[in-house]
Image: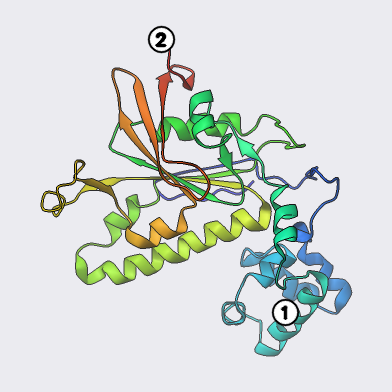
């Protein structure tokens, strides 16, 4: 089980177990770093890699040599050897469009609890990507997080065994506390970029879905540009570029909430209405 905590963070059952894919074969993504031992890398160095959170061969290839050299006890020569062995075990070169298409067959979707919201997202939360939901207070961000924590543990289509979801609620809360003013903005954005890069790396390395919530702020310049909605999500372009899909949540009547696709690479800009119930997120009742 992987658990990381910012303001509130959930990580549901990321377990060491086999995952059945649509083509029946397991990808090289989950090759354990222990394989390095049979290729001349000593156990002590493998332990150091695991201590730094690098547990797969692909994880080594996704980590820069500079960062590996910062691990205590790993010299530049050792890092070069580890990198060389890892490349021989896992093909990390360019991929053709056909290979990318085959890889995307392993992507799974996690239901949000609402059929309308699932339809808006093209079937639910997508793995190997970051989905961001932002909105004002009481728009259902944390309720959606709780519902996803439960539903992700249920088996799904294409051999999905459940439990592969990482949630950060909220991604910007502590950054707003720890960094204040324009003088610290550059440092804040750099730290934020590193966090988001790590989340993206984890989602691709382990084929899991990442769901983050975000807060909003008033835009002082909105009135000058005649924008209907003066509020915007915080985090700037760093967060906007890192999120694969962005969902704007706003309040409706009573317990109804409205979700709008704010940005998506493959879904049109449209809206869906859902409800917050005692049982979590559900479809709106007529």
Residue under label 1 = 83
Q: Is residue 239 left or right of residue 181?
A: right
1 and 2 marks in contact (CB < 8 Å): no
**SS for callout 1:** helix
| Residue 114 visible within the image | no
Q: Nearer the viewer, residue 207 or 170?
A: 207
Q: Above or below — where is 216 with respect to 190? A: above
Q: Nearer the viewer, residue 135 or 262?
A: 262
Give the quarter of the image for residue 139.
Answer: top left
Q: Residue at x 75, y 60 (%)?
A: 99
Question: Residue 208 in the image: x percent, y percent?
Answer: 63, 48
Around disc 1, counting alpha carbons within 10 Å, would you say few (fewer than 14), some (14 to 19), or many (20 or more)?
some
Question: Residue 78 in the image: x percent, y percent?
Answer: 72, 85
Q: Residue furthest top?
A: 286
Question: Residue 9 in the image: x percent, y percent?
Answer: 47, 44
Give whichever of discs 1 and 2 has the lower sequence position: 1
Q: Above or below — where is 24 with respect to 37? A: above
Around disc 2, counting alpha carbons within 10 Å, would you say few (fewer than 14), some (14 to 19), or many (20 or more)?
few
Nearer to us: label 1 or label 2: 2
Q: Above or below — where is 28 with respect to 154? A: below
- Mark 1 → mark 2, Cα distance in angstroms: 58 Å
Question: Residue 111 in the image: x percent, y percent?
Answer: 58, 31
| Residue 156 visible within the image | yes
Q: Residue at x 53, y 61 (%)?
A: 198
Q: Residue at x 66, y 65 (%)?
A: 54
Q: How is the image coloured?
A: rainbow
Residue under label 2 = 286
Q: Residue at x 77, y 74 (%)?
A: 86
């Amino acid at each position: 089980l992987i658990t990381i905590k910012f303001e509130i963070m959930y990580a549901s059952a990321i377990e060491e177990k086999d995952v059945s894919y649509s083509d029946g074969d397991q990808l090289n993504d989950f090759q354990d770093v222990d394989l390095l031992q049979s290729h001349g890398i000593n156990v002590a160095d493998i332990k150091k890699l695991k201590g730094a959170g690098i547990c797969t061969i692909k994880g080594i290839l996704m980590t820069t040599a500079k960062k590996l050299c910062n691990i205590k006890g790993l010299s530049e020569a050792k890092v070069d050897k580890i990198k060389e062995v890892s490349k021989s075990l896992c093909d990390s070169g360019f991929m053709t469009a056909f290979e990318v298409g085959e890889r995307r067959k392993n992507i799974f979707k996690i239901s949000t609890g609402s059929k309308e919201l699932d339809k808006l997202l093209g079937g639910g939360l997508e793995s190997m990507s970051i989905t961001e939901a932002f909105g004002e207070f009481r728009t259902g961000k944390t309720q959606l997080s709780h519902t996803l924590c439960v539903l992700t543990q249920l088996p799904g289509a294409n051999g999905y065994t459940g439990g592969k979801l990482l949630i950060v609620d909220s991604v910007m809360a502590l950054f707003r506390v720890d960094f204040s003013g324009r003088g610290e903005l550059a440092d804040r954005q750099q730290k934020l970029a590193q966090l988001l890069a790590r989340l993206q790396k984890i989602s691709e390395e382990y084929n899991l879905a990442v769901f983050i919530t975000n807060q909003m702020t008033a835009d002082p310049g909105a009135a000058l540009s005649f924008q209907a909605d003066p509020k915007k999500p915080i985090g700037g372009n760093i967060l906007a570029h890192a999120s694969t899909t962005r969902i704007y949540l706003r309040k409706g009547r009573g317990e109804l909430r409205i979700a709008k696709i704010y940005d998506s690479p493959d879904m049109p800009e449209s809206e869906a209405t859902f409800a917050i119930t005692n049982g979590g997120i559900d479809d709106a009742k007529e």
